[in-house]
Image (spheres, rainbow, N blue to C red):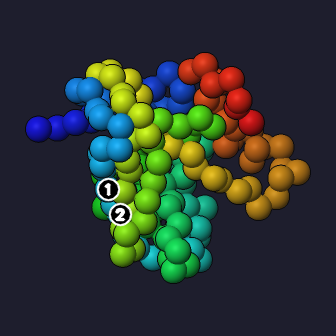
């Protein structure tokens, strides 16, 4: 039985939403895509990237999962400073787990921990600006 669906998000572009209630600690998704080097992923993103969308998920061994290649619905998880889900790495795979009970129809969020190479680049900062305040996060950075 499917647990989530991708649809338009009021936060940014598409988002992942619960179809049914999810329990706290429930493993909901695996982040899938092509495993490649950061160099290849960044070059590909610069060449093909969509403004404001990054489908790259870094792994502890220095490689990256590129969700734009063979990815699944997990690539549409939006960022929030106070997320309702978290990620964990297990043998080179990334899993998304709920942090608290999530109701049917609620959007799922993770903390991106996104670092911008040049924080003084205003255009780049605007492109990746946090939008979680739109869903009532009081501690949005």
Q: Residues within 10 Å of mark 1 (few under 14, many from 20)?
A: some
**x then y, percent, for residue 140:** 70, 31
Task: Give the CA distance from mark 2 to mark 1.
Answer: 10 Å
Left or right of 137 in this view: 24: left
Residue drawn at (50%, 21%), measured in percent from left and top?
10
* Outermost residue toward the right in this view: 120
| Residue at the disc numbered 1 | 30
Q: Secondary structure at mark 1?
A: strand
Find residue 85 and report its image quarter.
Answer: top left
Question: Toward the viewer: 47 or 99?
Answer: 99
Does 30 sit above or below residue 8?
below
Residue drawn at (33%, 60%), measured in percent from left and top?
32
Does 3 sit above or below residue 68?
above
**x then y, percent, for residue 57:** 50, 61
| Residue contact between numbered discs 2 and 1, judged by CB atoms under 8 Å | no
| Residue at the disc numbered 2 | 33
**x then y, percent, for residue 48:** 52, 58
Find residue 11 and report its image quarter.
Answer: top right
Badge count: 2
Question: Toward the viewer: 48 or 22?
Answer: 22
Does 60 sit above or below residue 25?
below
Residue drawn at (39%, 74%), measured in percent from left and top?
92
Q: Residues within 10 Å of mark 2 (few under 14, many from 20)?
A: many
Q: Secondary structure at mark 2?
A: loop
Q: Is residue 6 visible?
A: no
Residue drawn at (33%, 23%), measured in percent from left and top?
103
């Amino acid at each position: 039985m499917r647990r989530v669906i991708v649809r338009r998000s009021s936060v940014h572009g598409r988002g992942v939403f619960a179809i049914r209630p999810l329990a706290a600690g429930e493993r909901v998704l695996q982040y899938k895509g092509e495993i490649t080097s950061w160099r290849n992923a960044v070059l590909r993103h610069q060449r093909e990237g969509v403004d404001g969308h990054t489908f790259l998920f870094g792994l502890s061994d220095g490689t990256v999962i590129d969700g734009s290649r063979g990815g699944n619905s997990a690539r549409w998880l939006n960022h929030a400073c106070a997320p309702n889900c978290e990620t964990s790495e297990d043998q080179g795979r990334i899993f998304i787990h709920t942090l608290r009970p999530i109701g049917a129809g609620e959007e799922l969020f993770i903390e991106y921990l996104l670092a911008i190479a040049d924080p003084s680049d205003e255009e780049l900062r605007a492109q990746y600006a946090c939008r979680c305040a739109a869903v009532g996060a009081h501690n949005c950075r």
